Image (tube, rainbow, N blue to C red):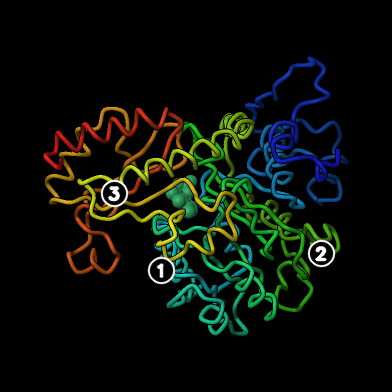
């Protein structure tokens, strides 16, 4: 079915939905299987030669995972998707399918901490250099691209800063040098708030653990191929060249504009083993059915919370990208539906101790390292994610002792505001 003419809300339900199951069941089946019987040896040989599509082994593909991948590809308008066991796995697979020892990646400085560690420590140990630009401008990023650059990487909205780089300008800088642009679009809510393909990105990675799942019930990631990059420009012999693992098969010849996503599956999942379980893919599909409704509520709840916090005597400063005084407000307006997003940062008055008291006094909002959940989440970086940093490094990272990251959930915002109010009182902040 051609989903491209259907609205987002229709695609999030119908793309990948089971239609031809002999049971006529409404929902997709979960296939808890590791392997698949081959009716003949010839059929099996064709599968292994990649001349025949079909299921070989769940590390490579699974019918539940395929249905979920089809849904996400349809939401983004991509030519294909590969589901992974986590958001970090999606980034790992995407990047290592492009860059080999001696190559490099150029990245925006506004990165999730886990991605920063992968780029700063693990990839260099494998011989892949990651050049993190001093700023997120197209000029700063473009200037770092050289003959060994295999990808440019940025988050559409950085975690936790909510920095929104100029996606179109960075895409143009990468395209001008024949390099694909990978966007981590976790904050873009699977294309509902932001679709980087519309701005020239070539590959999207997403932590499905967050808004796609939406209920904090499973880990997952997904890679989506826009099918809009010329892999035949001489920079990518592993994609446009003989594949050692498949008797010299050229992936561009075999898969056309879906060559990259094919590589993520046939080499990436095969060799790195980062497949999700069918059950988790099922949960992702259920999550996606209500994505737009949830996210719309969360964006509105974030705005209400931000306004309440801005007016509260317990709060020193609110950093919400939907407010005009936020440094990335203009780009958020341009690239994000509703111009907001569903995460904000707030610095409380008082001390580390009073902030800890506030967090511990919350009765509804949960203290976790999570975003995009149906439960409102308050994270205190100084006592959790950034606990190991020295005072100087905390200052450099912009993490003050009273800073909180807040991800709005699906509750009635009035109840969350009341919960914050009582916790401010309990902490002696007002
Ligand atoms: C922007 C971003 N990218 C990637 C990840 C990693 O995803 P996961 O935790 O699913 O591995 C996260 C996790 O918070 C994230 O916020």
* Neighbour tally class for label 3: few under 14, some 14-19, many 20 plus, Cα within 10 Å: many
Q: Is residue 32 left or right of residue 129?
A: right
Look at 82% across and 17% down and name the residue there. 22
Quarter of the figure that contains the N terminus: top right
Residue 404: mark in rendering: 3
Percent coordinates x, y for residue 203 in the rendering:
66, 60
In the rendered view, tell whether residue 162 sits above or below residue 139: above
| 3 or 2: tag closer to the N-terminus | 2
Look at 56% across and 77% down and name the residue there. 138
Q: Is residue 20 left or right of residue 183?
A: right
Q: Which residue extends farthest top?
A: 23
Closer to us: 190 or 115: 190
Q: Does the residue at mark 3 contact the one at mark 2 (Cβ under 8 Å)?
A: no
Which residue is under mark 1? 120
Closer to us: 402 or 122: 402
| 3 or 1: tag closer to the N-terminus | 1
| 1 or 2: tag closer to the N-terminus | 1
In the rendered view, tell whether residue 320 sits above or below residue 125: above
Q: Does the residue at mark 1 contact the one at mark 2 (Cβ under 8 Å)?
A: no
In the rendered view, tell whether residue 46 sits above or below residue 16: below
Percent coordinates x, y for residue 392 in the rendering:
19, 69
Q: Quadrant of residue 116?
A: bottom left
Q: Quadrant of residue 26?
A: top right
Closer to us: 128 or 224: 224
Which residue is under mark 2? 252
């Amino acid at each position: 079915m051609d989903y491209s003419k259907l609205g987002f809300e229709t695609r999030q339900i119908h793309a990948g939905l089971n239609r031809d199951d002999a049971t006529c069941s409404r929902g997709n089946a979960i296939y808890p299987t590791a392997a698949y019987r081959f009716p003949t040896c010839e059929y099996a040989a064709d599968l292994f030669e990649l001349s025949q599509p079909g299921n070989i082994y769940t590390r490579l593909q699974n019918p539940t995972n395929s249905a979920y991948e089809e849904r996400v590809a349809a939401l983004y308008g991509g030519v294909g998707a590969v589901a992974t066991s986590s958001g970090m796995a999606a980034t790992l697979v995407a990047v290592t399918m492009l860059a080999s020892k001696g190559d490099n990646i150029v990245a925006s400085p506004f990165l999730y901490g886990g991605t920063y560690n992968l780029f700063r420590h693990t990839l260099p140990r494998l011989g892949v250099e990651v050049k993190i630009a001093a700023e997120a401008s197209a000029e700063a990023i473009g200037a770092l691209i050289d003959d060994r650059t295999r990808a440019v990487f940025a988050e559409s909205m950085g975690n936790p800063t909510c920095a929104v780089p100029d996606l179109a300008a960075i895409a143009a800088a990468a395209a001008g040098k024949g390099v694909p642009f990978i966007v981590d679009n976790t904050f873009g809510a699977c294309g509902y708030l932001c679709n980087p393909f519309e701005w020239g990105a070539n590959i999207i990675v997403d932590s499905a653990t967050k808004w796609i799942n939406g209920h904090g019930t499973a880990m997952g990631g997904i890679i989506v191929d826009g099918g809009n990059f010329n892999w035949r420009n001489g920079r990518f012999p592993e994609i446009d060249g003989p594949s050692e693992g498949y008797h010299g098969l050229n992936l561009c010849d075999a898969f056309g504009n879906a060559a990259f996503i094919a590589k993520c599956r046939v080499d990436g999942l095969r060799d790195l083993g980062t497949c999700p379980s069918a059950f988790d893919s099922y949960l992702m599909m259920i999550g996606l059915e209500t994505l737009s409704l949830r996210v719309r509520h969360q964006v509105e709840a974030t705005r209400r919370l931000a306004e309440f916090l801005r007016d509260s005597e317990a709060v020193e400063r609110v950093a919400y990208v939907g407010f005009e005084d936020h440094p990335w407000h203009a780009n958020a307006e341009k690239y994000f539906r509703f111009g907001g997003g569903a995460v904000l940062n707030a610095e409380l008055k008082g001390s580390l101790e009073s902030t800890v008291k506030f967090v511990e006094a919350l009765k509804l909002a949960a203290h976790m390292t999570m975003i995009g959940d149906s439960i409102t989440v308050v994270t205190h970086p100084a006592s959790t994610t950034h606990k190991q940093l020295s005072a100087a490094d905390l200052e450099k990272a912009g993490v003050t002792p009273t800073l909180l990251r807040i991800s709005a959930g699906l509750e009635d915002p009035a109840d969350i505001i009341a919960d914050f109010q009582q916790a401010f009182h309990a902490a002696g902040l007002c």
